Amino acid sequence: MAQILRTTLIVDEAQTADGVTNFDLPVNPLSIVLLTVKALNLTGVASYLFIAGLLNMITNVNIRYRGATIVDGSLADIAMLNAIVTGWWPWQCAGAAADDAVRSLTVPICLGRRPYDPNECFPATRRGDLILQTTNDVAVTGQDGLILQAETVELLDATPSQFLKYTTTSKVYNATGEHDIELPIGNDLLGVLLQGPVVPITASYNATFGRTKIQVDNVEAIYSETNWESLHGELLRRTGYPGAMLAHTHTVNVAASTEGITRENVNDDTIIDNYAYLDLDPLKDNQYALKTDGAARVNLRVNTEAASATAMRVMPVELVKVGGAAA
């Protein structure tokens, strides 16, 4: 019989200053890390972010095995990627808009496409080999008093054959035209998350990832060319886009509050707007995954329609075989 062990890793650790925290992850096969951000509303400012503010309090999450990176990215990017790949959205508890009201948001960090899958999770390790590291920002607009929680889901008798690896590459291309972004080689690629600082808005259709193609050894593969609008639309369809989750704008009447603000915008609509996803595993069974073993180079060729001094980000999803050379 399969055995699951759910354990609390971090118990309400208050973060009083910006910095980095490190925690030893458990030694049994690991399927999920549930990272929770807790904070108080700070509504005495011109505007505050509802869910985006909580995500922005963790600027980087890193899971390392003996120094090798398995997961690396901002909490917002990791939340979006897991929603796409696993269908597990982060959900918020205690969403009151009053000043100093408590809030919390739990983000699943999954190491397999199906949480609880004994064939696809991180294998058993020795104590101290697998580390969770967070980089914290306690001075986010509209949030006050960062507290971290984390829980883990171990599959005690699992003998996985593979696990997911997803890391971030950031590039600043402050010019329009074609640019290349290198992708990892050696493991099968299941998809690539794109985060662009410029997307179609108001009277402009221009986007950082205006048109994108994948090349393997300078030959187009799977995506000979695709447009931002269609990629973004497919992301919304694949995730089901639950409007109560990561992307919506609503207005709260706080006329009676001590801040004297008559209407307060609670803005999260830009979170999902800046993302798209190159899906290389639409059936989640590896049959369309991009094989990179033996390739000399795999890259994205991006036609940038609008220059920006802000970095574009890509997060490729790799399927790592346990014991494989590229692990």
Image (tube, rainbow, N blue to C red):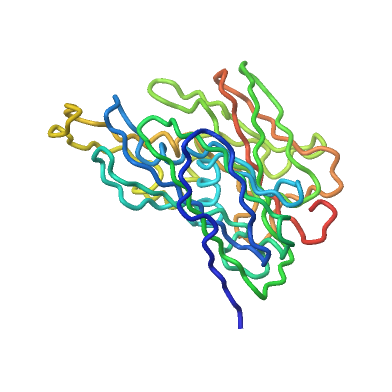
Q: Position of residue 260 (x, y in %)?
A: 16, 26
In the rendered structure, the answer to whether residue 152 lies left or right of residue 53 reads right
111 horizontally vs 7: left or right: right
Q: Residue at x 41, y 36 (%)?
A: 53
- Farthest residue, direction top: 175
Please state which of residues 82 and 241 is positioned toward the viewer in this rendering: 82
The residue depicted at 69 percent of the width and 30 percent of the height is 301
Residue 61 to residue 323: above or below: above
Q: Position of residue 186 (x, y in %)?
A: 81, 48
* Residue at 87%, 47% in the rendered image: 294
Rendering coords of residue 257 (x, y %): 16, 33
Give above or below for 211 relative to 245. Answer: above
**Dividing the picture into quarters, in which one does residue 24 lie?**
bottom right
Residue at 14% x, 32% y is 255
Q: Quadrant of residue 202?
A: top left
The furthest residue to the left? 256
Q: Quadrant of the N terminus?
A: bottom right
Residue 250 left/right relative to 166: left
Foreground residue among 153 and 315: 153
Which residue is nearer to you in this view: 168 or 66? Answer: 66
Q: Position of residue 241 (x, y in %)?
A: 41, 49
Q: How many marks?
A: 0
